[in-house]
Image (cartoon, rainbow, N blue to C red):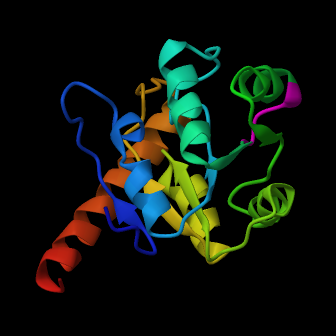
Amino acid sequence: QTVDKCTVETNVKNGELLSYIIDFEALYQKGYRSLLTDVDNTLVRHGAPSDRRSEAFFEKLHRTGWKTCVISNNNKERVAPFAEKNRCLYICDAGKPGTKGYFQGMEMMGSDLSDTVFMGDQLFTDIYGANRAGMKSILVKPVHLDKKPFILLKRLGELIVKKFYFRYAKKHP
């Protein structure tokens, strides 16, 4: 698994969400040691508590040696219980796509840009912010398509950008 400036993958493989089947052990072997991740629609439905799948995911990461930090624009009441259940550091009210939260998360984990990767489901906040910070990033398929008009408009914009990105990437491998 290669993590470039922005690795864009939108498939569901083997019935699992991409966030749960990324080969983090291979990334660890490549020198990555710290994961910053969004929560809502990256790991669980928006507002949902930690579940068995997210708990097993973080347990495996921690056994491998990963340091983890949840970074979310949501509030402490939402983020803290999820992060604490999964033994993760956390940053709430992160202000993504601003870069402050990303750097704060790396500082909390004792990491830097060379060994940190970010994972999120939103191109215009999660991935854009990580890339603005100079961080490696992985865009994953949203866990759930929110039907709120504003979210649907953002997702439509993301689809358009991804279409042009894939067209460009195909012509310029």
Farthest residue, direction bottom: 172
The residue lying toward the viewer, choosing from 141 and 108, is: 108
Residue under the image location 56 percent in, 65 percent down: 128
- Whether the magenta-drawn stretch holds residue 75 is answered as yes
Residue under the image location 49 percent in, 59 percent down: 28
State the image coordinates of residue 103 (x, y, percent, origin top left): 79, 66
> Does residue 110 appear to the left or right of 23 in the view shown?
right
The quarter of the rendered structure image containing the C terminus is bottom left
Range of residues picked out in magenta: 72-76
State the image coordinates of residue 17 (x, y, percent, origin top left): 34, 32
The quarter of the rendered structure image containing the N terminus is bottom left
Q: What predominant SS class does the magenta segment belong to?
A: loop
State the image coordinates of residue 22 (x, y, percent, origin top left): 37, 46
The residue lying toward the viewer, choosing from 24 and 149, is: 24
- Whether the magenta-drawn stretch holds residue 80 is answered as no
The residue lying toward the viewer, choosing from 118 and 63, is: 63
Image quadrant assignment for residue 30: bottom left
- Residue 149 vs 122, above or below: the answer is above
Image quadrant assignment for residue 20: top left
- Residue 153 vs 99, above or below: the answer is above
> Does residue 135 appear to the left or right of 77 in the view shown?
left
Residue under the image location 79 percent in, 20 percent down: 81
- Residue 70 vs 58, above or below: the answer is below
- Residue 128 vs 74, above or below: the answer is below
